[in-house]
Image: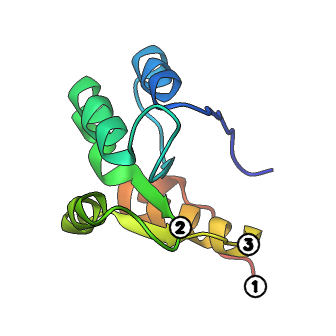
């Protein structure tokens, strides 16, 4: 309820969204999409807008191809392991917002 969400089910569609909207506060990207890897989406999105680089969070399963795992691990971006619950997702969004746009993070409720 606190955030506007735009979803995509393919890497190509995600890149088209980046081209259309420019900048997102947080980008969750599955490690392996039907048409691209997260690394390919990341690289293409960052070519469109370099400010997106720290805003990517990669959702990974239990096993990734070794090369993809190594390349994603070399990035400073956060990774979230599937399956995850809504509470974890909310925590990651807040953490990302604190890092990339501190003034937009709502104050913690007491």
Callout 2 crowding tier (Cα within 10 Å): few <14, some 14–19, many ≥20: few
Q: In front here: 35 or 10?
A: 35
> Where residue 72 appears, x then y in whole percent?
28, 61
Q: Residue at x 66, y 71 (%)?
A: 83
- Residue 110 screen position, x and y as percent: 75, 85
Write the residue at 26% across / 68% down: 73
> Disc 3 marks which residue?
85
Q: Secondary structure at mark 3?
A: loop
Q: CA distance from mark 2 to mark 1?
A: 34 Å
User: Mark 3–mark 1 contact, CB under 8 Å?
Assistant: no
Q: Which label sits in the foreground, 3 or 2?
A: 2
Q: Is residue 26 left or right of residue 47?
A: right
The x and y percentages for residue 77 are: 32, 62
Q: Does the rendering let one see residue 32?
A: yes
Q: Which residue is mark 2?
A: 61
What x and y, as percent, mark residue 68?
29, 57
**In front here: 97 or 9?**
9
Mark 3 to mark 1 CA distance (whole Å): 22 Å
Q: Quadrant of residue 18?
A: top left
**Upstream in sequence: badge 2 or badge 1:** 2
Crowding around mark 3 (Cα neighbors within 10 Å: few <14, some 14 to 19, many 20+) is few
Mark 2 lies on a secondary structure that is loop
Residue furthest right in the image: 1
Which residue carries the number 1 mark? 110
Quarter of image, res 106: bottom right
Colouring: rainbow
Secondary structure category for the residue under label 1: loop
Assess whether mark 1 and mark 2 are in contact (beta carbons under 8 angstroms): no
Q: Is residue 107 visible?
A: no
User: Is 65 drawn above or below residue 6 in the view shown?
Assistant: below
Q: Is residue 84 above or below residue 96?
A: below
Mark 3 / mark 1, whichever is N-terminal: 3
């Amino acid at each position: 309820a606190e955030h506007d969400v735009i979803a995509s089910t393919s890497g190509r569609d995600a890149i088209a969204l980046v081209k259309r909207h420019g900048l997102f506060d947080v980008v969750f990207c599955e490690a392996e999409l039907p048409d691209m890897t997260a690394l390919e989406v990341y690289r293409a999105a960052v070519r469109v807008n370099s400010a997106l680089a720290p805003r990517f969070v990669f959702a990974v399963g239990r096993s990734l191809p070794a090369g993809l795992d190594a390349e994603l691990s070399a990035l400073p971006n956060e990774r979230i392991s599937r399956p995850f619950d809504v509470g974890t997702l909310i925590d990651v969004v807040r953490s990302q917002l604190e890092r990339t746009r501190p003034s937009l993070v709502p104050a913690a409720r007491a």
